[in-house]
Image (cartoon, helix red, strand yellow):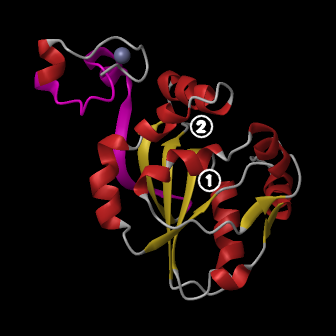
């Protein structure tokens, strides 16, 4: 088994006793900031797995740009059992990339990251414009809200929805999606992100 980040073999004694779940070596594990807890972001409960770090940045880049699909899936591995148990009756909706970016790439990387949870995915949310996030201004937030569209919204009605994203910055994107989804009367919505940037 190789470390997901530095690719060294995880065979040393310290890795063995550290019980890193064979995803990262001891050294990389120390540089990863695992949160795996519910935090309040803008009055909303968000389940955050990691703090965004250089290591995560590299792995997400490898996934998006170098098509290293396995790397993304492995990020979930340490939490897999717990997440499956916690969200077993939920349908996943992924925060969208611009649809043309996914088309060029051939996949939606956020979907890949959460794939190992084996939850049903509702492809109902997409971004109709490429909009780089300068989410801070009110104008920016308004624009983000306007770039997100929901199609086949009736699929959402009455369901438990797990809204997921790879990197949360201010939270504006995810909260915009949540508000759009609410119109279709889901039974429940929970938010889960792979990582949160400190801003
Ligand atoms: Zn490593």
Q: Residue at x 86, y 54 (%)?
A: 139
Q: Is residue 134 visible?
A: no
Residue 7 point in image, percent of width and height? 40, 14
Towards the viewer: 169 or 115? 115
Gap in Å between the C-alphas at discs 2 and 1? 11 Å
**Element at label 2:** loop
First to last magenta residue range = 17-42
Q: Is residue 10 visible?
A: yes
**Element at label 1:** loop
Quadrant that contains the C terminus = top right
Describe residue 4's horizontal placement relative to residue 163 as left or right. Answer: left
Q: Is residue 194 above or below residue 59?
A: below
| CA neighbours of label 2 inside 10 A, class few (<14), some (14 to 19), many (20+) | few
Towards the viewer: 75 or 43? 75
Q: Which residue is drawn at 10% across and 24% down?
A: 17
In the image, is residue 61 part of the stretch drawn in magenta? no
The residue wearing badge 2 is: 199
Q: Residue at x 52, y 42 (%)?
A: 196
In the image, is residue 29 part of the stretch drawn in magenta? yes
């Amino acid at each position: 088994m190789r470390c997901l980040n530095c690719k060294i073999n995880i065979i040393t004694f310290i890795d063995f006793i550290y019980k890193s779940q064979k995803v990262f070596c001891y050294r990389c594990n120390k540089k990863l900031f695992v949160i795996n807890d519910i935090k309040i972001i803008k009055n909303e409960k968000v389940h955050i797995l990691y703090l965004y770090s250089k290591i995560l940045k590299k792995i997400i880049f490898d996934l998006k740009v170098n098509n290293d699909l396995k790397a993304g899936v492995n990020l979930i591995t340490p939490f897999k059992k717990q997440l499956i148990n916690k969200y077993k009756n939920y349908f996943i909706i992924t925060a969208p990339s611009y649809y043309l970016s996914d088309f060029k790439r051939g996949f939606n990387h956020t979907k890949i990251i959460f794939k190992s949870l084996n939850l049903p995915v509702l492809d109902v949310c997409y971004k109709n414009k490429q909009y780089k996030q300068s989410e801070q201004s009110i104008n920016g937030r308004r624009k983000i809200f306007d770039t997100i569209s929901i199609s086949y919204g009736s699929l959402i009605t009455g369901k438990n929805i797990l809204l997921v994203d790879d990197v949360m910055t201010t939270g504006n994107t995810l909260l915009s999606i949540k508000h759009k989804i609410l119109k279709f009367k889901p039974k429940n919505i929970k938010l889960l992100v792979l990582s949160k940037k400190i801003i």
